Amino acid sequence: MVSSYMKQAVVWGIRWAIVIILLASCSSEKKKQQLSSVTIDSSPEQGATVVVFGEEKGVTPLTLTDLPPGSLEVILKKERYQRTVETLLLRPGEHSQYKLELKPLQGYINFETEPPGAEVYLEGVKIGNTPIFRYAVEIGHKKYKLQLTDYYPVEGDLEVREDFQYPIKYILKPMEGTINILSRPTGGTVRINNVPQSQKTPLQLQLAPGEYLITVSADGFLEEHSKVLIQPNKEQTVTLVLKEGETPPGMVLIPAGEFIFGENERSPDEAPRRKVFVPAFYIDKYEVTNEEFKKVFSDHNFPKGQERYPVTGVSWDQAMSYATRVGKRLPTEIEWEKAARGEDGREYPWGNEFSLDFCNTREKNLDMPVPIGSYIGGVSPYGCFDMAGNAYEWVSDWYQRYEGNQYIRKEYGQIYRVLRGGSFMTEKFDARCARRHFDRMDANRADYGFRCVKDLPKNLSVQKN
């Protein structure tokens, strides 16, 4: 009886054990079915180290299995790229795929040129035109090229580091222009900005862009000049036709003819503006210098090195005396203004707009004269230098009312002599071609100088073509 009972108990025990094992097995299988897996890749490059739960698991592309579902923090690390942290969502029992974007480490470059507008190439790819500011670029060695039409290109390289900013600035060098200089007759002696050239006309020169004074002379002919603007990588031709005659050394010919004299809308004593005929005459190309003045007046002293500076501190009486001794005279107001202004009534010897690049006035802040001929761009239509600024210039006339002018001043009469052209001590208004200044004949202020004129021989008359 007991034996039968025991047998049944064992049987039931075995049955329950089997049930428990089966239930446990089902539970484990169900749990296993709820785990997740994931494949992690990276872009734009693979091979990034994958860190999960603080441990490096491998490099992309990488598959991880038996992961609990839910959120998974993944860290990617790769040289030359920023550290990337992403949280991935894993679903129970599912396989997920993620491609994570790697952001490269970057520096920044500014590209600037003078003039602006240059094309910028980085690693052979055009990225825009200057100016370009804070252009993001991957770290590492980079090559660049800047190019602008009619300018020489610039190339360079640099090592870009993380978060550094690199300023790239260039003043671009313009390509030379070509000038063909011809003359009639041929074989003329050429000067460029008063520098003699070894070759006679015809000749071809390559010159840096800018304004130049071309002067051609030949024995038995009057000197001719032309102001030209050389442009980058452009070719041009200038032809100078020489007229028979002789020009005294250091002087230029002002041909006979009408020009616009005076001004209506500036200072009252300059009116009226009208056309005036002037016979031909010669005038000094430059203001009289210290060394020239000392040859006549041996007691004249000046600082060493200023031989080619305009003589200043000269009275009208001294200027007249010098002119007489060298066989010349002082110009009249009308002669001086025509030589400075040309025929078209311009405001300044070079045109109607004032420019500090063309003269030495108070705006220049030099507080002293400069060597004669320093401002090529300021040359007058006839080739005279420094007729605006540098030194005031005495003329022969009394300070009188112009014919047709109704303005009355107590200074009019045979009391004061006129000076023209302004100086390094005066402002641009006084450097105008029509501007009149006056002073006593014995006044010898620090900015008073002069230039001379000479009459043509009686048997020679030169008219404008």
Image (cartoon, rainbow, N blue to C red):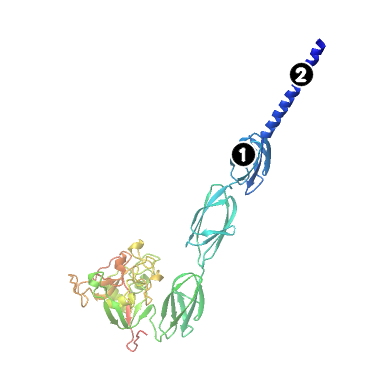
Q: Which mark is residue 161?
A: none
Residue flagged by tag 1: what amino acid is it?
Val
**Mark 1 element type:** strand
Quadrant in which residue 47 is drawn: top right
57 over 418 or under it: above or below: above
Residue 120 image offset from top left, x and y in percent: 54, 60
Q: Is residue 46 visible to us here?
A: yes
Residue 306 image offset from top left, x and y in percent: 38, 67
**Mark 2 element type:** helix
Q: Earlier in the sequence, mark 2 or mark 1?
A: 2
Quarter of the figure with the N terminus: top right
**Image point 33% across, 63% down: which residue?**
362
Residue pointed to by mark 2: 12
Q: Is residue 332 visible to us here?
A: no
Residue pointed to by mark 1: 74
**Image point 81% across, 13% down: which residue?**
4
Relative placement, left or right, of 113 versus 459 is right
Q: CA distance from mark 2 to mark 1?
A: 52 Å
Relative placement, left or right, of 85 versus 267 is right
365 over 250 or under it: above or below: above
